[in-house]
Amino acid sequence: AITTLGTGDDEQMIDALQGTYKSNFMLHYNFPPYSVGEVGRFGFTGRREIGHGKLAWRALQAVLPAATDFPYTIRVVSEITESNGSSSMASVCGGSLSMMDAAVPLKAPVAGVAMGLILEDNGDYAILSDILGDEDHLGDMDFKVAGTEEGITSLQMDIKVAGITPEIMEKALAQAKAGRLHILGEMNKALSAGRQEFSAHAPRIETMTVPTDKIREVIGSGGKVIREIVEVSGAKVDINDEGIIKIASPNNESIKTARDMIHAIVAEPEEGMIYDGKVVKIVDFGAFVNFFGKRDGLVHVSQIENRRLNHPSDVLKEGQQVKVKLLGFDDRGKVRLSMKVVDQETGEEISGDKKE
């Protein structure tokens, strides 16, 4: 089995009777003719492959982490290379190990086993564990049971008799549990716990949440702002209606750049903090400085230096990089900035003694 990790763009869209929704977990089961020694063409996916894949999907879906804890889209492909038993239960075991190897934090490992039944006319019976192809073909039951050490996550029964007794069902489930625990023990020898590190080829994904009233600002008119974030950072950025943003990139630096750009858009500047800025306009009474993303504030001429200036242009020019402290907001909500209380070389605040 092979596990591939993707982003929100890779989720499967399900067109169901109740409406359309998306799934972040896919399991594809492939059963080529050569796996049973036959020669044939690869055609469309058949009902058998869809059914076996869905059974394995149900077995594994129960132990997946919450999307908020693991914001990846997961695709597991089970390639059956040889079959003389239950390939769907093999897909459960292989899929569980594959996801653990891919650093998917499963709640618990999952294994599966197929149980069989030989029922005589006089009521005598024998329950078989891990049945072979002939035992499936000639026997009276194919009972697939998958789960963890704690319980069952998926099961399916095919029977060729009119029915089975509660006693047979109870014994079959008990025997299936013993077989499942044995298989989990063998799997544990190969991989006892999930990997802690992702593959070098897997995307890194971080999530952040913004207020819903800020979503429009992050996206921008016609998607202009979010496209700029993607182009500048090189990361893939997805945002939903709840304000949850997923940032994906193989490069951690790209994720940091995108996160900082989004934070600059949605965050509010704090009074008393020092920011990097750029002079965008000089007027007689001071200079307007762009800081904290797209925000502008006024540095009054009296707040530029600790001396009297005839005009702000004596020491400033448009496009100049400066460091400013946010003093507060005036009655109209306009930002008041100061340069003279900040060391323009180090960016540190100048104490009162030093200003004197």
Image (cartoon, rainbow, N blue to C red):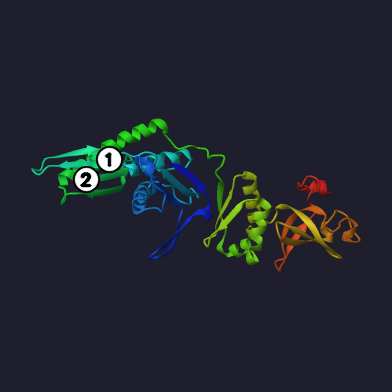
Q: Position of residue 356 (x, y in %)?
A: 84, 49
Q: Is residue 82 left or right of residue 265?
A: left
The residue under label 2 is 141
Q: Earlier in the sequence, mark 1 or mark 2?
A: 1
Name above or below for residue 345 compared with residue 14: above
Residue 246 visible in the picture: yes
Residue at 83% x, 54% y: name it.
320
Q: Is residue 99 left or right of residue 164?
A: right
* Residue 28 circle label: none
Q: Which picture quadrant has residue 192?
A: top left
* Nearer to us in this view, 179 or 151: 179
Between the C-alphas of marks 1 and 2, the distance is 12 Å
Mark 2 residue type: Met
Q: Is residue 47 left or right of residue 272?
A: left
Residue 268 visible in the picture: no
Mark 1 residue type: Gly
Q: Position of residue 22 (x, y in %)?
A: 46, 58
Give SS at disc 2: strand
Q: Estimate how packed mark 1 is, as few (under 14), some (14 to 19) or many (20 or more) residues with alpha carbons within 10 Å.
A: few
Name above or below for residue 14 compared with residue 128: below
Give SS at disc 1: helix
* Residue 133 circle label: 1
* Nearer to us in this view, 3 or 306: 3
Residue at 38% x, 33% y: name it.
188
